[in-house]
Image (cartoon, helix red, strand yellow):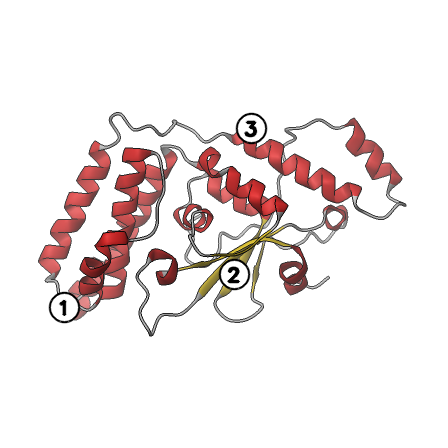
């Protein structure tokens, strides 16, 4: 089975991300597609394991195997959590719907650290641009402001909403370079301070619900194995003797395009 066959035949969830999901698209915006596929369990019984991620098929498309996706979400990875909350869902099956029902299980105060840590890394790149060229990459500055606002609102409310909403025009003005860099910097500092202040009394739990996610992974792996060919009786016996909550791990992982580990 080729990697792109896994995406074509075994995708459980697919959505549009980027500016279109953030409510910041213009006529020139690309359509970035992201997805999650469930590799059939018998593929893990071979020496060569299925991939943890696949680029394509087609341009601007990237997918993660379900377990890798869950691992990154449990770490509070910003891009992965935002993918789970995209308002533009293109495909979802029963497994995908159960994954979406777990969105709250992935959210914790870890997200504050990952969102703000990722924002700090992007801010350093913008500062380097200003030193070298005299101006930042305005599109990146816009998305950094959006990310900081998301981090603040998530920490305040315990809910992640990625659409810019009524901030759209103000953010697009930054993208067009109509807002002085000094003002953009002031907004970044203010949003970061507001996010930090929101830590006091935040409804987010200290840690994600890893046991709930592990139970979900066990169930879908087991169901996939039981759908395998009848001659896998030995594997069926092992599965029948198993218990929910088994710790599933893979090796050789990649987070994805622009996704922090």
Q: Earlier in the sequence, mark 1 or mark 2?
A: 2
| Disc 3 versus disc 1: nearer the observer | 3
Residue under label 1? 134
Earlier in the chain: of badge 3 and badge 2, it is: 2
Label 3 and label 1: CA atoms lie apart by 49 Å
Q: Residue at x 33, y 74 (%)?
A: 28
21 or 36, which lies in front?
21
Q: Residue furthest bottom?
A: 28
Q: In the image, residue 206 lies at what x, y percent? A: 38, 27
Q: Which mark is residue 62?
A: 2
Query: Seen in the image, is 249 located left or right of residue 196?
Result: right
Asked if residue 215 lies left or right of residue 146, the reply is: right
Image: 37 above or below 67? below
Q: Residue at x 51, y 43 (%)?
A: 100
The residue that mark 3 highlights is 211
Q: Residue at x 35, y 70 (%)?
A: 29
Q: Residues within 10 Å of mark 2 (few under 14, many from 20)?
A: many
Residue at image coords 33%, 52%: 163
Q: Are marks 1 and 2 in contact (CB under 8 Å)?
A: no
The x, y position of residue 32, in whole percent, is 44, 64
């Amino acid at each position: 089975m080729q990697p792109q066959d896994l995406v074509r035949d075994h995708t459980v969830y697919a959505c549009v991300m980027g500016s279109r999901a953030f409510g910041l698209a213009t006529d020139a915006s690309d359509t970035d597609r992201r997805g999650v596929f469930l590799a059939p369990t018998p593929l893990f019984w071979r020496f060569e394991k299925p991939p943890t991620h696949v680029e394509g098929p087609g341009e601007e498309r990237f997918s993660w195997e379900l377990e890798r996706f869950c691992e990154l979400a449990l770490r509070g990875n910003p891009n992965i959590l935002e993918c789970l909350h995209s308002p533009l869902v293109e495909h979802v099956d029963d497994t995908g719907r159960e994954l979406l029902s777990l969105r709250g299980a992935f959210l914790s105060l870890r997200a504050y650290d990952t969102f703000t840590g990722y924002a700090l890394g992007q801010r350093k790149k913008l500062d380097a641009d200003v030193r070298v060229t005299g101006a930042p990459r305005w599109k990146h500055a816009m998305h950094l402001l959006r990310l900081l606002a998301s981090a603040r609102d998530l920490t305040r409310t315990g809910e992640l909403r990625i659409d810019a909403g009524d901030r759209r025009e103000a953010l697009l003005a930054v993208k067009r370079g109509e807002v002085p860099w000094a003002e953009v910097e002031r907004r970044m500092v203010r949003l970061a301070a507001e996010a930090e202040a929101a830590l006091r009394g935040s409804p987010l739990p200290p840690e994600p619900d890893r046991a709930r996610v592990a139970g979900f992974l066990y169930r879908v792996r087991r169901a996939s194995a039981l759908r395998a060919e009848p001659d896998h009786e030995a594997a069926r016996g092992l599965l029948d003797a198993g218990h929910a909550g088994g710790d599933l791990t893979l090796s050789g992982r990649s987070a994805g395009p622009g996704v922090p580990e």
